[in-house]
Amino acid sequence: MSEHKDDPLAGITVIEHADGVAASYAGRMFAALGANVIKIEPPSVGAALRHAAPSLTKEPAASALFHYLNSGKRFVTCALGSTRGRALLDELLGKAALLIDDTPVAQRVQLALDPDSIAARFPALVHVSVLPFGAMGAHAGYRASELNVLHAGGEGYLMPNGLTLESFPDRGPVKIYGHFAEMIGGTSAAVAALAALAACEASGGQFVDVSVQDANVSVGCFAVQRLGEGVLENRRERSFKYGGVLECSDGYIGVLTLEQRQWEGLVELMGNPPWALDPALRDPLERSRRGAEINRHLRAWATTQRVDEVVQRGQALSVPLAKYNGPGDILDSEQIKARHVFEPLELPSLGTVPAFTAPLQLDGHALALGHGAAAPGADNEAIWCGLLGHTATELDDWIRHGTV
């Protein structure tokens, strides 16, 4: 967790029982804000995400995704299928303000993690459920991957578009690289959990039911809105009529001219070519109608430009354009460095790496995660004995019997 004692969530204990990306990301945000996040994993093997690709090392395998999602947390093991394990969980929940859980609905009653049971035992606890389709409804019991929830949210129907679609017109819909949809779900879970915690004094504990699909529908809400107006957007019609992503000689830029003065600045930036001086193109509606023609000219011109030079000249002319940064550009950015968006993170057996913390600062300091993800049960003694007061003898006995 963060090392700043004045972080906003310092002193708040969060119990995270999560095997998926969305719930794990919600816990990560709480760790970045200074909460004491304790992650519960099955004894010995740990969470399945520990084996998720890509790996930082081969022997032993170290998942980059797991480290990213779980830095700053503490790690205990507990067999919730056993009576003793469930009792230990209750002891932990008695110390906590928040539970983040992504146990499938069908398994919750057996593990005493269903909302009614939790509310009866811990009426002041905020219980956040994070599932692909939520904990209620016809699809509550469905399993899903990143691919499923992205397309179920509608965003995949609209991709690819723009330059990608023009370059590869015969390819089918795609998903965004990585775990975009699940992290959107995790962000929604974190925000909802904070709201519920803020309301605790007035209303007590609450059950917060987060659907990753619902969170992703909100990302594509404009397409849903336009459907209500009788317009069915698709990836071929979603693109801006002209502009968008342009390939330069040494990279890519994004250009969008919504106002007349911006279009005029773009024409000047291109050196006032004869085709762009056609009087008809002063009409924005005509420009939209001739978008494909304009884009052919724009793409031909862009290939003769260098990114940094054209961005500098274009911005001086009030043309809304910017460089498309790659990962290396982000790490080298003076703006990113000034805001400490990436902070050194010590990973076991791997050394120090730059790691994204959070997209905000508090009182002028960056949020530091403190340490990388540890091995399953690395904090068993500190939590079961130090926090809860059990003895080393008890802990040894639980280890022998597979309870922790």
Image (cartoon, rainbow, N blue to C red):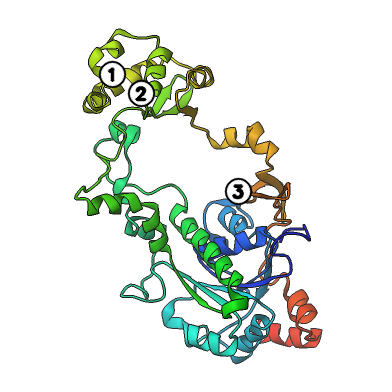
Amino acid at dot 3: Pro
- The residue nearer to you, when weighing 173 against 229, is 229
Residue designated by label 3: 359
Residue visible at 23% across and 54% down in the picture = 228
Assess disc 1: are there few (<14), some (14-19) or many (≥20) residues with their C-alpha within 10 Å of its C-alpha: some
Label pair 1/2, CB-CB below 8 angstroms: yes
- Residue topped by disc 2: 260
Picture coordinates of residue 290, whole percent (x, y) = 22, 24
Question: Vertical placement of 355 versus 266: above or below?
Answer: below
Q: Secondary structure at mark 3?
A: loop
Task: Residue at 58% x, 32% y: name it.
Answer: 329
Locate the C terminus by quadrant.
bottom right
Q: State the image coordinates of residue 381 (x, y, percent, origin top left).
A: 77, 76
Which residue is at the front of the view, 396 or 322? Answer: 322
In the picture as drawn, the residue positioned furthest to the left comes out as: 230
Distance between mark 2 and mark 3 Cα atoms = 34 Å
Give the amino acid at mark 2.
Answer: Gln
